[in-house]
Image (cartoon, rainbow, N blue to C red):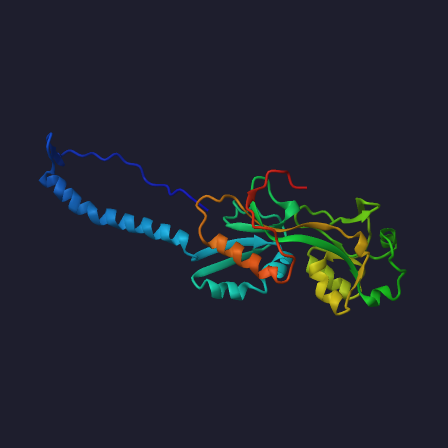
Amino acid sequence: MGQCLPLPRRNIDIRFTSINRTTRVVQLTSEGALLLDQITPAMTAIGQALDSLNNAEKEVRGTLRVTGPTVAYSLLLERHVADFLRRYPQLQLEVQIDDALVDIVGASLDAGIRLGERLALDMFATPLLRNERMAVVAAPSYLATKPPIESPADLLRHDCIRLRLKTNGTLYPWTLTIGGESRAVDVEGRLVLDNMPAVLNAAIAGCGVACSFERVAASAIADGRLHQLLPAYCQDYPGWFLHFPSRRHMSARLPAFIDFFRAANLDTWERLPAPAIGRRRNRPT
């Protein structure tokens, strides 16, 4: 966010006397007065430019570049973007939707949205949404002709829709709480997709059993397009965080984004504890 400007270096060769100095007075020579007259406009312009930049850091204006996965955008941002832009008419918001783990520094971005368990080492992070919960779901049309699913072991007899992670190319593990312990269930299925909304839509179409964030599936569960399965076995995960490299020289754009979208999501999701911004030091799991 803060960046040093490369300034040209040159030696200034002054071959005239610019001031006359005595023990009682310092006075410009005629050459010094001429020099002052010529450089004053440039120095004034530099001062005005610096004042403008300092004031811009205090105003919500300019461009804010943020990245996040498809799910985070649809859950946290999409419904509120119009209100955010109306609130800050001098701000331009650029959102890079990417399900991979984006290097925000290398990509010249201001911040990124990630799950708490995937925060990068030594990044500052602040919560936008505290918890996420997984849900196992399937359409009534699929369940009508299949064996009942009453325990995690029953999943092994079903066609499960798998999610391939863009972060590392592996299949997303179905981790459930079994006997008080967190265990990965090695499910199988004939359909593999690379984003969660597509997995959910395939489940609604009757392609099989899916594992999704509960909030992503909430409307389909509420209107009966999907049935929620094994809720007692599903786990909570650290929720969504905004992460960024430094708090030094932070413009007003990023705090405005944090405050707005945290507040916008409080009415829908669980209320957050007191806001906290801290550096991530533990290695992500």
Q: Is residue 75 above or below residue 237?
A: below
Kindly tell me whether residue 145 is visible in this rendering: yes
Farthest-out residue, front? 274
Q: Position of residue 191 (x, y in %)?
A: 78, 57
Q: Position of residue 218 (x, y in %)?
A: 71, 63
Q: What residue is at 87 percent from the left and 66 percent from the top?
A: 144
Q: Nearer the viewer, residue 27 or 45?
A: 27
Farthest-out residue, top? 23
Q: Quadrant of the C terminus?
A: top right
Figure disc tally: 0
Q: What residue is at 53 percent from the left and 66 percent from the top?
A: 82
Q: What residue is at 69 percent from the left and 47 percent from the top?
A: 169
Farthest-out residue, right? 147
Q: Is residue 222 left or right of residue 74?
A: right
Q: Is residue 22 left or right of residue 256?
A: left
Which quadrant of the view contains residue 2? top left
Q: Is residue 271 left or right of residue 7?
A: right
Q: Nearer the viewer, residue 110 or 267?
A: 267
Q: Is residue 90 left or right of residue 42?
A: right
Q: Position of residue 239 (x, y in %)?
A: 65, 51
Which quadrant of the view contains residue 204? bottom right
Q: Position of residue 138 (x, y in %)?
A: 80, 62
Q: What residue is at 53 percent from the left and 50 percent from the top?
A: 111
Q: Nearer the viewer, residue 269 or 26?
A: 269
Kindly tell me whether residue 192 is visible in this rendering: no
